[in-house]
Image (cartoon, rainbow, N blue to C red):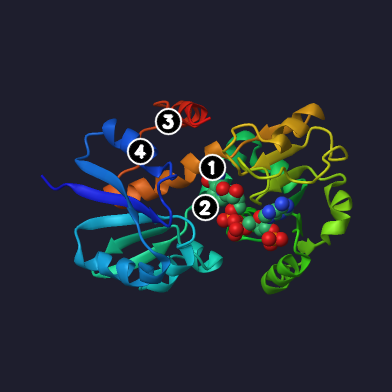
Amino acid sequence: MILKVAGVTGWPVHHSLSPLIHNYWLKNTKITGAYTMFAVHPNEAVYAFKSLKRTTISGINITSPLKAKAFEAADKMTNDAEKLGVCNVLYKSGDMLIGHNTDMEGFLGPLIETVGPQFVLNNTAVIIGAGGAARAVLGALLSVGAPEIIMINKTDERVEKLVSQVNVPSLYALPWAQRENAIFGAGLVINATSAGMHGKAPLDINLEYMQPGGWVYDLIYTPHKTVLIKQAKKYGLNTIGGLGMLIAQARPSFKLFYGELPPIGIGVHALVKTHLKSLK
Ligand code: NAP
């Protein structure tokens, strides 16, 4: 029997929830596998990742700040990784190290499941942020044909650069000072910034004039209910938190490491939620 070994790497990595999720899935399958964590210093990361080819490790997830290093180390990229310029998964295929990114799929899964494709196709979406997560959200919304996407970011130059690189007619940026105008009438607002995370100041945005019945999707999952989600509820808007995405982006990597998708409906969402509550 072959033991399939995978894990997550980052610097630091101890905060990662991936071992909790993957080991829970493993426990509920017949796979002989293990999932662990490896701390890798950024200066050593490319060498360490390339060396995976000389080990029996099936693959790894990559968290901050090593996602660009993983991209550099890969022999070949999937389309999703190529689009985003960063990898959150490295896996082996023959003698090749393949770089992949599951964030687009992870973002889209809970959105389409909850909101439905028609809503996305009939509403203006606002993406807040211009980092790796915002790029994944943008890639996902473009892939489903969102008709109008407005991007805003605290540092205007960063989002302007991103929008001009992507250069599609349905996408434009507005200055941070005009964020109220961006939000006005929008059906879908996505927080892809780190503002509102546990220990950080909440996102400075007013959702009052979003379209009634609109959706607010906050990618943050610690805390479970962010100040932004609470504000959305106050205005009667619908909400999606970041936990669903966290689990949805882990699912395809499990398949790449262990050869099959993890079981569904076995309470992984509740497990992670309980774990996060216990950290307070
Ligand atoms: P990143 O590349 O470091 O980008 C951070 C973004 O946050 C930048 O756009 C930055 O704006 C913005 N920002 C930081 N502080 C801000 C503030 N006080 N007000 C407004 N904007 C602020 O990070 P990332 O990888 O994109 O991740 C962003 C968030 O998404 C993180 O909280 C992460 O946990 C979450 N995420 C969740 C999942 C999931 O599975 N649920 C997956 C990926 C990411 P500037 O450019 O102006 O600095």
Whether the residue carrying mark 2 lies under 8 Å from ligand 1 is answered with yes
82, above or below 203, in the image: below
Label located before the other in sequence (2 or 4): 2
Q: Nearer the viewer, residue 130 or 185?
A: 130
Can residue 139 be seen here?
Answer: no
Circles 2, 4 touching at the beta carbon (< 8 Å) = no
Q: Is residue 103 left or right of residue 196?
A: left
Can residue 198 be seen here?
Answer: yes
Circles 3, 1 touching at the beta carbon (< 8 Å) = no
Which mark is nearer the camera, 4 or 1? 1
Q: In terms of secondary structure, where does tag 2 sit?
A: helix
Q: Which residue is mark 2?
A: 103
Q: Is residue 222 left or right of residue 129?
A: left
Q: Nearer the viewer, residue 265 or 38?
A: 38
Under mark 4, the amino acid is Pro
Label located before the other in sequence (3 or 2): 2
Which mark is nearer the camera, 2 or 4? 2
Label located before the other in sequence (3 or 4): 4
Question: Which mark is drawn over residue 262?
Answer: 4
* Cα–Cα gap, marks 1 and 2: 8 Å
Q: Which residue is mark 3?
A: 268
Under mark 2, the amino acid is Asp
Neighbourhood count class around disc 3 (C-alpha, 10 Å): few under 14, some 14–19, many 20 upward: some
Q: Position of residue 145 (x, y in %)?
A: 67, 55
Q: Which residue is mark 1?
A: 245
Q: Give the residue furthest to the left.
A: 1
| Residue 153 position by quadrant | bottom right
Q: Nearer the viewer, residue 156 or 197?
A: 197
Q: Is residue 192 left or right of residue 13?
A: right
Circles 3, 4 touching at the beta carbon (< 8 Å) = yes
* Cα–Cα gap, marks 3 and 4: 10 Å
Which quadrant is the N terminus positioned in? top left
